[in-house]
Image (cartoon, grey):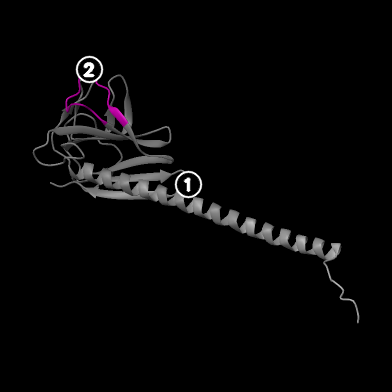
Amino acid sequence: MKPRTQRAFTLIELLVALAIFALLSAFAYRGLGVLLDSREALDRDSRKWRDLALFVGRFERDVQSLVDRPALGPSGTPQGPVSSIIDLGGATATGLALTRAGASLYANALSAPQRIGYRLAEGRVERLSWTGLDAGPRAVPAATPVLGDVRALAFRFLDRNLEWRRDWALPAMQGAPLAVEMTVELAGGERIVRLVDIPR
């Protein structure tokens, strides 16, 4: 009777198996890394477009709640219901300032009018709000960032001759334009143009 021989793995077979396992693990790790990077990029893009949609919605509500009432700036200069120059007291900024009905959360016909504005500062769009419609000499607006990673922000105004203008003068002599066009250029190069008509 022949003795039963036991067969075991040789050292070379173990090394080959370990090498194959290491290669499979490296491919799996690399694939997982690509998947995680793709998911992070998708989340980032989703946040960017969500923030942009919220900003555009808020801008539209503000413009469509316009009240045809002049205001007094901190420097004492009369301002129209819509202005392309923001009076900050000791300084001015370009952007959009307007008089809207009520607060943004409680917009109705009985709410007190409010002066708000939009400007670009340090790569982000800020929404400015004053405590009163006619600002005092030292009134400083509260600035709330509403959109980040912005390269450019521009406004155009449609006058009664159906011509587009880049500026809408500060003194309260022109009334309100027929429509406001906003152009936002994001840091990634995307360009969004939004046209909002002003209700009569």
The amino acid on which the numbered mark 2 sits, given as a three-letter code, is Pro
Nearer to me, 127 or 159: 127
Q: Position of residue 10 (x, y in %)?
A: 85, 65
Compared across the picture, whether 39 is left or right of 92 comes to right
SS of the residue under disc 2: loop
Q: Which residues are magenta?
A: 129-143
Residue farthest right in this picture: 2
**Within 10 Å of the Cα at label 1, are there few (<14), some (14-19), or many (20+) other Cα atoms?**
few
Magenta-span inclusion, residue 130: yes
Name the disc covering residue 188, or none: 1
22 versus 57 height, above or below: below
Residue 148 location, x and y as percent? Answer: 41, 39
In this rendering, would 179 be left or right of 4? left
As helix, strand or loop, the secondary structure at mark 1 comes to loop
Residue 32, percent from left and from top:
59, 56
- Which residue lies at the image location 36% right of the left edge and 49% below the top edge? 50
Q: Quadrant of residue 101?
A: top left
Dominant SS of magenta comes to: loop
CB of mark 2 within 8 Å of CB of mark 1? no
Measured along the vertical axis of the image, is residue 43 above or below residue 134?
below
Q: Earlier in the sequence, mark 2 or mark 1?
A: 2
Q: Amino acid at mark 1?
A: Gly
Is disc 2 surrounded by few (<14), some (14 to 19) or many (20+) residues within 10 Å? some
The residue shown at (63%, 56%) is 29
The residue where tag 2 is placed is 137
Residue 3's x, y, as percent?
90, 76
